[in-house]
Image: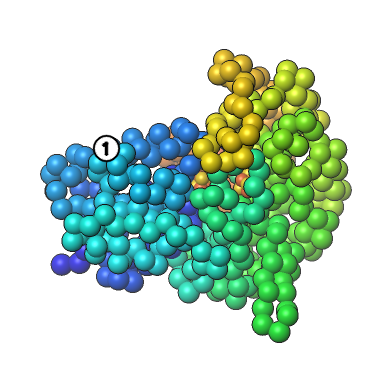
Amino acid sequence: MSKTFYIETYGCQMNAADSEVVAAILEHEGYTRVEEKFEADVILVNTCSVRENAEQRARGRVQGFAEVKKRRPEVLVGVMGCMAERLGEALFEQEKNVNIVVGPDAYMKLPELIERAARGERAINVELSTTETYPGICPSRVDATAASGFVSITRGCDNFCTYCIVPYTRGRERSRPPGSVVNEVLALRAGGCKEVTLLGQNVNSYRWRGEGGATMDFPGLLGVVARAAPDTRVRFATSHPRDMSDNILRAIADHRNICRHVHLPVQSGSNAVLARMNRKYTREAYLDRLRAIREILPGCGLSTDVFVGFSGEREEDHRATLELLEEARFDAAFMFKYSERPGTVAARKLPDDVDEETKGRRLQEVIELQGRLSLESNRAEVGRVAEVLVEGPSRRNEEEARGRTEQNKMVVFPGKGRRAGELARVRVKGCTAATLLGEIEEG
Ligand code: SAH
Ligand code: SF4
Ligand code: F3S
């Protein structure tokens, strides 16, 4: 009988992509994936460390697997991803259920680690690599019918924003060979994907150095991918404002199948805070990039990440963030409270000195403001016809279909029987702050 594994994924899209790499590695070794944890010989949790509450959630899951272990004591529990990397050996002490700890660059070793754990050893590998990109692994898709797939193009991050754990959990930045990126895109397309998202912590700094001194940068890669799969929507995330060059914007403009949507995390609207964050741009430079995006890519969707309550954030810094949001008029934003991460520069040198109540109030103000701006952005779409890539039935109502516009806006419309991967022309009839509501436009 073949061995089975079950995998749960938390955190960012990179983790979603990595779980598919891990699935491919295990399937190659003869394992079968199961959807039910009680049927698994190995349970894996792919974890995130970006904020304290992400780690709490992962711990909660790991503790919950005690009920599986009670029924089947031989089951092995593995923690993978960023929290595995951050905590390493200590995880065995802190979480009694854990048998395997494996970091983001050690997934090729997972079959071996499982064997060691099965012999009763504590199996751990959290070595970071400067070269590992899993170029030979064709990821095994979690949802083989999904309209959209992920392809990682870089791993790691060298930016060292002072608040961020990622450079420590994911190691140094490295780029995957263009050939392996294109192969993966073509494999997704052959498997029915109509959209691919190129992934990295900072995709703009993609740079491949081939033999004989040939190099390829991110605009070059965008062009290669867009031409290799001209009938596939191409997206990418995340962009760093400092590296969002006009060349990249022109590469998007040159290819109809690269989606007009940029996710450009701003983090704060205050220059003093941005400097303490080591973001390496000013508010003015950031706004200049928004101007360039809107000039070179008219109608481009724009979204951001922002967080309140970083070390030393005064009321005037917070107001600068609110003002920036007003000025930028993002279509959408992910909004957070600062969470100090052990081992970062901020944890060592910058006190976490904004009290919890103030953080909560500031976050609420940001959420309220952005809610209004998102609603206004969506209202401007009412009456227009959008091309929507159907992702599946709406989460709330089986009679309705759900999909996204090129600008990455979610659209819900009556469309029972519309299948994931279909393109639909939808007239927008109404909206909420998060969703456009429409009807199929016949003809
Ligand atoms: N590489 C991307 C995203 C990294 S993590 C980038 O450079 O923007 C995703 C988001 O989490 C960040 O954009 C930031 O807004 C938020 N984040 C990162 N570290 C955080 C921390 N310590 N506390 C709160 N939010 C954080
Ligand atoms: Fe973290 Fe900054 Fe790297 Fe993004 S660019 S992953 S926020 S260090
Ligand atoms: Fe989280 Fe690691 Fe992604 S810390 S956001 S899973 S890179």
Depth order, front residue of 244/63:
63
Q: Give the number of callouts.
A: 1
Position in image of residue 170 (x %, y %): 53, 54
The structure's colour scheme is: rainbow
Residue type pointed to by label 1: Gly
* Left or right: residue 360 compared with residue 99: right
Q: Is residue 289 left or right of residue 98?
A: right
**Which residue is rendered at x = 72% and y = 74% of the image?**
215
Residue 329 seen in render: no
- Residue drawn at x 48%, y 74% as measured from the top left: 136
> As drawn, is 142 to the left or to the right of 4?
right
Between 130 and 282, which is closer to the camera in this rendering? 130
Q: Which residue is mark 1?
A: 64
Residue sitting nearer the eye, 380 or 240 = 240
Report x, y in % for residue 178. 63, 72
Percent from the top left, x then y, of residue 217?
73, 67
Residue in front for this viewpoint, 117 or 428: 117
Q: Which of the image's four quarters has the N terminus? A: bottom left
How packed mark 1 is, by other alpha carbons closer than 10 Å (few <14, some 14-19, many 20 or more), is few
Q: Secondary structure at mark 1?
A: helix
Task: Report the residue at 73% width, 80% height from top.
Answer: 213
